[in-house]
Image (cartoon, helix red, strand yellow):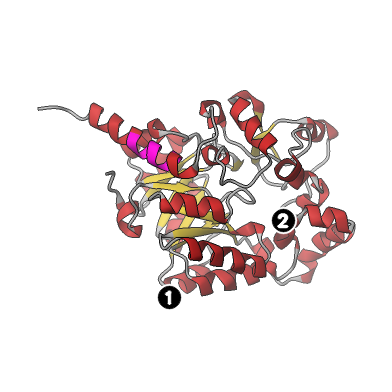
């Protein structure tokens, strides 16, 4: 068994966390990963507060193992300044009911007060950990500490890692450029050791890690575990249209691109007609989260309808190492077993 500060802190069997991928990471995936001895993470940003409460309740009814919830808490989402919300209100108001229904997965990011409601739900539920993306506000960390909730910060740069460390988070996920979804500029192999050298908190590695080789490499770099996204898309428990999952199985690293066209922030996703159209349009993104409303139903049609030409399909460069759909629990156990075998084989013999 691989023992690290991550497994010790949460009582895990394996130092593996599934990423809190918005829409993809719902209760079924979280439960499967946690029950297999890793730590599943719910993509909490995808749910309006009442639905988030139900989804967490679903998880708690099916596992007594630790799990995490991913939230986005930048000022642009937590502010009550009406002037800041006005452009988003206008964009949201321009959509018809059909389009709004299609955008259910980002409704909370386009609705004033919804993120504050998410925070209240998560603090009341007190999961083992909360994973924060984009910002690590002091007030939220203090609230978590008072409830015994550990805070994990997902960062893509050394500067953001140092900022999170000063804020007092418990763990830091160093996510390299190879990763799917919102990501930074620096490769995993470079970023992880740089952050390990700079902070006192245990660091998890993310970006391009899809199997036991990636886990073993991360541990050799000094990481306390891994944060894995793309590999879990190709599992029965992940939310998403089968066409999207089959696209993952057929995909190569060259099929991905960095685009601002869906969310207004840097996102690695499959290249398609929409991302190419955006690149040649000369338009500037409306910023985060307003660009979601500009992108309209394209944000959801990849997940819901299998629209590979216009739908949003975040995916990492590790996609080219994924060849079959595998139950999430098997992914966890196989990854851990492979890593143990590799590390034993590499250990010096007397």
Q: Which residue is mark 1?
A: 146
Circle 1 packing at 10 Å, graded few (<14), some (14-19), many (20+), is: few
Q: Work out whether residue 228 or residue 36 is closer to the camera in this orientation and state it.
A: 36
Q: Is residue 18 left or right of residue 37?
A: right
* Quadrant position of residue 285: top right
Can residue 273 be spotted in the picture?
yes
In percent of width and height, residue 217 lies at 36, 33
Which residue occupies 46% across, 63% down? Answer: 167
User: On the rendered image, what quadrant is the C terminus found in?
Assistant: top left
Which element carries disc 1, helix, strand or loop? helix
Q: Is residue 89 left or right of residue 119?
A: right
Q: Is residue 214 left or right of residue 157?
A: left
Q: Is residue 207 left or right of residue 257?
A: left
* Quadrant position of residue 189: top left
Can residue 139 be spotted in the picture?
no
Which residue occupies 72% across, 47% down? Answer: 264
Circle 2 packing at 10 Å, graded few (<14), some (14-19), many (20+), is: many
Q: Work out whether residue 238 or residue 229 is closer to the camera in this orientation and state it.
A: 238
User: On the rendered image, what quadrant is the N terminus found in?
Assistant: top left
In percent of width and height, residue 216 lies at 34, 35
Which residue occupies 51% across, 27% down? Answer: 321
**N-terminal of the two: label 1 or label 2?**
2
Question: Does the magenta run of residues contain 333?
Answer: yes
User: Range of the magenta residues?
Assistant: 331-337
In percent of width and height, residue 3 lies at 27, 48
Q: Which residue is mark 2?
A: 106
The residue mark sitting in front, 1 or 2, is 2
Q: Are marks 1 and 2 in contact (CB under 8 Å)?
A: no
Question: Does the magenta run of residues contain 38?
Answer: no
Which element carries disc 2, helix, strand or loop? helix
Would you place residue 309 above or below residue 262 in this image?
above
């Amino acid at each position: 068994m691989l023992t690290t500060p991550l497994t010790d802190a949460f009582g895990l069997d394996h130092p593996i966390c599934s990423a809190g991928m918005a829409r993809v990471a719902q209760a079924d995936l979280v439960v499967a990963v946690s029950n297999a001895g890793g730590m599943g993470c719910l993509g909490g940003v995808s749910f309006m507060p009442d639905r988030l409460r139900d989804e967490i309740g679903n998880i708690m009814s099916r596992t007594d193992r630790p799990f995490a919830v991913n939230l986005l808490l930048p000022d642009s989402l937590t502010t009550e300044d009406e002037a800041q919300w006005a452009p988003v209100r206008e964009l949201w108001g321009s959509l018809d009911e059909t389009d709004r229904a299609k955008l259910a997965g980002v409704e909370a990011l386009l609705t004033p007060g919804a993120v504050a409601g998410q925070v209240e739900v998560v603090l009341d539920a007190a999961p083992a950990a909360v994973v924060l993306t984009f910002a690590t506000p002091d007030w939220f960390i203090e609230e978590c500490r008072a409830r015994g909730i550990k805070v994990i910060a997902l960062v893509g740069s050394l500067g953001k890692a140092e900022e999170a460390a000063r804020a007092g988070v418990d763990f830091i996920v160093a996510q390299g450029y190879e990763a799917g979804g919102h990501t930074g500029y620096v490769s995993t192999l470079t970023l992880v050791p740089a952050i390990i050298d700079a902070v006192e908190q245990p660091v998890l590695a993310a970006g391009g890690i899809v199997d036991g080789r990636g886990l073993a490499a991360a541990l050799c770099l000094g990481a306390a575990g891994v944060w894995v996204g793309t590999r879990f898309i190709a599992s029965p428990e992940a939310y998403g249209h089968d066409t999207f999952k089959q696209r993952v199985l057929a995909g190569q690293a060259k099929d991905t691109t960095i685009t601002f066209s869906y969310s207004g922030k840097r996102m690695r996703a499959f290249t398609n007609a929409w991302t190419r159209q955006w690149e040649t349009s000369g338009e500037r993104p409306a910023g985060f989260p307003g660009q979601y409303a500009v992108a309209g139903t394209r944000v959801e049609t990849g997940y819901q309808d299998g629209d590979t030409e216009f739908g949003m399909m975040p995916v990492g460069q590790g996609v080219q190492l994924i060849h079959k759909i595998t139950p999430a629990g098997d992914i966890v156990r196989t990854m851990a077993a492979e890593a143990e075998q590799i590390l034993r084989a590499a250990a010096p013999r007397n």
